[in-house]
Amino acid sequence: MDAAAIVVMIIVGAIAGWLASLVVGGPWGLLGYIIAGVIGSVVGGWLLNAAKININLGNPIVNQIITAAIGAIVVILIARLIS
């Protein structure tokens, strides 16, 4: 993985985490948004793949942000249930 891919992953994670925080709340700051978004990206990709749901909005980055935001929402809700 090159540096550009890592930067894109961090930006997508930050946007997805921020969107998830708008939906379910949570003032964690930039680092919390990035962590929730990156973990959410993995969870969202797995969940949508398992449910055979294909998000195709015409732009791969937008598709990834939406998938990561869905996963981040799930991750945040599960974290709240645990704690």
Image (cartoon, rainbow, N blue to C red):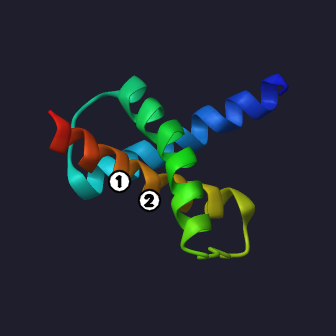
Depth check, front residue: 78 or 61? 78
Which residue, given by chain and number where applicable, does mark 1 sit on? 74
* Secondary-structure class at tag 2: helix
Q: Residues within 10 Å of mark 2 (few under 14, many from 20)?
A: many
Q: Residue furthest right?
A: 2
Q: Is residue 24 left or right of residue 20?
A: left
Question: How many numbered marks, from 0 up?
Answer: 2
Q: Is residue 55 left or right of residue 74?
A: right
> x, y percentage for residue 4?
80, 30
Residue at 59 percent of width and 76 percent of height: 53
Q: Is residue 50 above or below residue 31?
A: below
Q: Quadrant of the C terminus?
A: top left
Depth check, front residue: 67 or 53? 53
> x, y percentage for residue 64?
63, 56
Q: Is residue 66 left or right of residue 4?
A: left
Q: Is residue 53 above or below residue 20?
A: below
Mark 2 to mark 1: distance in Å? Answer: 6 Å
* Secondary-structure class at tag 1: helix
Residue at 47 percent of width and 48 percent of height: 16
Residue contact between numbered discs 2 and 1, judged by CB atoms under 8 Å = yes
Which residue, given by chain and number where applicable, does mark 2 sit on? 70
